[in-house]
């Protein structure tokens, strides 16, 4: 740990400080691990820090080292990061090769995900999250009710590591239903329901949603389609409407049908948008003060009468 060697005493002091609390609650203590051996969590829904926040973290680590250990999951292939994606990224940028870590093993998928979600909520405001990140948070909170006791134990451990008080906002969630969950974040039950659906779409669609290239209600409709259909939608590069998404949601639609459906829908819309131009004088004489629907009926009747007078042409 070349760049971090001068900070060894600070690291040891941090370990001593944590020994009576965190280490007592974990079986593996704190180790120094090569950062290159730690992979991001396989279902990590959050973006890494950028800009000033990242620069500040890099500067702090250069000066003080990594004081709070990251938390990793031991896997067959090495380690996966549970808590500390940003610290590890900043440490690498600061020139560190190793990082202090608490190693977990034999965690269920649900418990591992709790570490990932709750750590990020301790560092970021819910309102600052991207749409897909909010969806991930709400999904974890809503779907993991059965793991509430495990969550409380995990949050207690994370609170100690982060030096935060364990009060409100995290360990007190009842999560009885969408309405009660939404009330904690200033959302309606229907908004929670939509975000829960958004969490089901593929990463490429979440990316479009976060960038503003896809409407929330479109993503909600696409969440009911297969992964293959969703990938086919992204591959077209077309910006689709809610009506198109609803059509794609219908039973029997396969990925091979997507291009045709979207193209036909577009052509159909173009056909429906054909118009007939009339002069301003005629408009003012016959249609002034009339809405478009009334004007259309007048034109239709007038044309029917004209064709009939011309010899009963089949219209």
Image (cartoon, grey):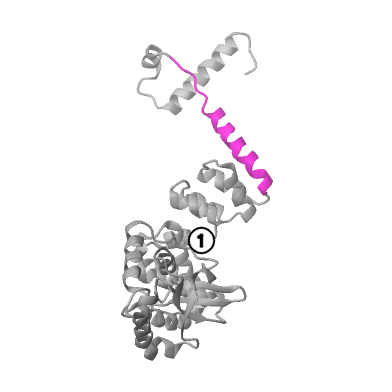
Residue labelled with disc 1: 199
In the picture, residue 19 is in which quadrant?
bottom left
Q: Is residue 258 magenta?
A: yes
The image quadrant that residue 308 belongs to is: top right
Q: Is residue 226 visible to the viewer in this orientation of the structure?
A: no
| Badge 1 element | loop
Quarter of the image where the C terminus is located: top right
Nearest the camera: 171 or 178?
A: 171
Task: Name which residue lies at 53% across and 44% down.
Answer: 243
Q: Is residue 102 visible?
A: yes
Image position of 61 with respect to 161: above or below: above
Q: Is residue 215 above or below residue 16?
A: above
Magenta-colored span:
254-278
Quadrant for the N terminus in the image: bottom left
Place of residue 310 in the rendered image (x, y in percent of width and height, measured from the top left)? 60, 8
Of the pair 211 and 218, the residue shown nearer to us:
211
Residue 247 in the image, given as x and y percentages of width and height: 59, 46
Crowd rating for badge 1 (residues with CA inside 10 Å; few <14, some 14–19, many 20+): many
Q: Is residue 222 above or below residue 46?
A: above
Can you give x and y, in whole percent of width and height, for residue 300 in the image?
A: 52, 21
Counting from the top left corner in percent of width and height, residue 177 is at 45, 71
The mark tally for this picture is: 1
Helix, strand or loop: magenta stretch = helix
Is residue 260 covered in magenta?
yes
């Amino acid at each position: 740990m070349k760049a971090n060697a001068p900070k060894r005493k600070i690291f040891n002091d941090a370990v001593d400080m944590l020994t009576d609390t965190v280490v007592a609650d974990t079986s593996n203590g704190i180790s120094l691990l090569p950062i290159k051996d730690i992979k991001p969590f396989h279902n990590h829904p959050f973006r890494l820090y950028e800009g000033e926040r990242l620069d500040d973290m890099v500067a702090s680590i250069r000066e003080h080292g990594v004081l709070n250990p990251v938390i990793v999951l031991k896997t067959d292939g090495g380690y996966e990061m549970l808590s500390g994606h940003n610290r590890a990224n900043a440490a690498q940028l600061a020139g560190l090769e190793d990082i202090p870590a608490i190693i977990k093993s034999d965690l269920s998928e649900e418990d591992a995900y709790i570490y990932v979600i709750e750590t990020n909520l301790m560092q970021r405001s819910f309102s600052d999250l991207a749409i897909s990140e909010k969806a991930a948070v709400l999904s974890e909170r809503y779907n993991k009710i059965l793991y509430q006791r495990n969550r409380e134990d995990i949050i207690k451990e994370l609170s100690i590591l982060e030096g935060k008080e364990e009060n409100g906002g995290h360990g007190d969630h009842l999560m009885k239903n969408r309405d009660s969950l939404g009330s904690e974040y200033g959302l309606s039950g229907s908004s929670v329901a939509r975000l829960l659906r958004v969490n089901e779409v593929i990463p490429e669609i979440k990316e479009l949603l976060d960038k503003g290239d896809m409407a929330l209600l479109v993503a909600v409709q696409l969440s009911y389609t297969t992964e293959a259909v969703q990938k086919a939608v992204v591959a077209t590069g077309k910006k689709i409407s809610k009506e198109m998404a609803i059509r794609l949601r219908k039973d029997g639609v396969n990925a091979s049908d997507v291009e045709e459906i979207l193209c036909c829908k577009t052509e159909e819309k173009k056909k429906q948008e054909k118009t007939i131009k009339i002069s301003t004088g005629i408009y003012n004489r016959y249609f002034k003060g009339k809405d478009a629907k009334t004007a259309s009926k007048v034109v239709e009747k007038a044309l029917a009468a004209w064709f009939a007078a011309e010899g009963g042409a089949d219209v």
